[in-house]
Image (tube, rainbow, N blue to C red):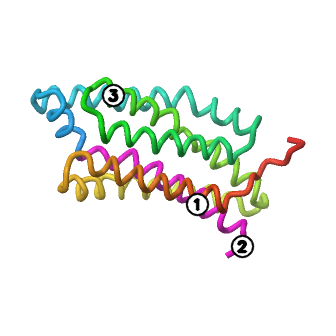
Amino acid sequence: MTHRRMALTFIFLTALIDSIGFGIILPVTPNLFMEITGEGLAASAVYGGWLMFAFAIMQFFFAPVLGNLSDAYGRKPVLMASLVMLCFNYLIMGFAQTLTLLFIGRIISGIGSATFSTCNAYIADTTPPDERAQYFGMMGAAFGLGFVIGPAVGGFLGEYGNRVPFFATAGLIFANLIMGFVFLPESLEKEN
């Protein structure tokens, strides 16, 4: 497999795992909230809404920041730092014993998973103009597929414990991180 193909495979896996990570926790979040707070399902739904809000607001503010950082320092360092943050987040959430730690973890996740713009910039850097639409479409498919796979995998892994999906996601992200260190060359030219 060529270096370009391996790099693009890494980019698609990053998008896929990122969206899987978003959905994988959905089936276990209510039970985890009930376990941590001792409150009922209704209160857990409210906490879950605030948790998703914290994630979304961090993504909203940090997607352009990560895009600008990738323009200034390169695509690879930003993607690697994002994966480290995501791995750290899922470990925090897996071990969390308080609502505060869950929210801290989800805020870190919102910051770290705002990588869509950086992944698209990598594709724009490495593909000819006549192939970009195809690869951008594949990025959208990776995100969509992850949103379908995530809750299904989370529900399956949740049968083994409320925290298992968090650790499984951290493991996936760590494997993706290693793949990135090995196979992902920097795509942004030094003069840019």
In this view, the residue in front, 69 or 151, is 69
The residue singled out by tag 3 in the image is 101
Instruction: Give the quadrant of residue 56.
Output: top left
Looking at the image, tell me whether mark 2 or mark 1 is earlier in sequence order. Answer: 2
C-alpha span from label 2 to label 3: 42 Å
Q: Which residues are magenta?
A: 1-27
> Circle 2: is it few (<14), some (14-19), or many (20+) Cα within 10 Å?
few
The answer to whether mark 2 and mark 3 are in CB contact below 8 A is: no
Counting from the top left corner in percent of width and height, residue 168 is at 35, 54
Nearer to us of marks 2 and 3 is: 3
Quarter of the image for the C terminus: give it: top right
In the picture, the quarter occupied by the N terminus is bottom right
Residue 32, x across and y down, in percent: 20, 38
Q: CA distance from mark 1 to mark 3?
A: 29 Å
Q: Which residue is mark 1?
A: 179
The answer to which of marks 2 and 3 sits earlier in the sequence is 2
Q: Looking at the image, which residue is at 69% across and 54% down?
A: 123
The residue drawn where x is 30% and y is 38% is 95
> Which of label 2 and label 1 is nearer to you?
1
Amino acid type, mark 1: Met
Image quadrant where residue 44 sits? top left
Report whether 186 appears left or right of 162.
Answer: right
Q: Which residue is mark 2?
A: 2
Q: Label the magenta part by its dominant secondary structure.
A: helix
Label annotation for residue 159: none
**The magenta stretch spans residue 176:** no
Q: Residue at x 31, y 23 (%)?
A: 100
Q: Is residue 18 magenta?
A: yes
Q: Along the line of sight, which residue is nearer the eye, 151 or 129?
A: 151
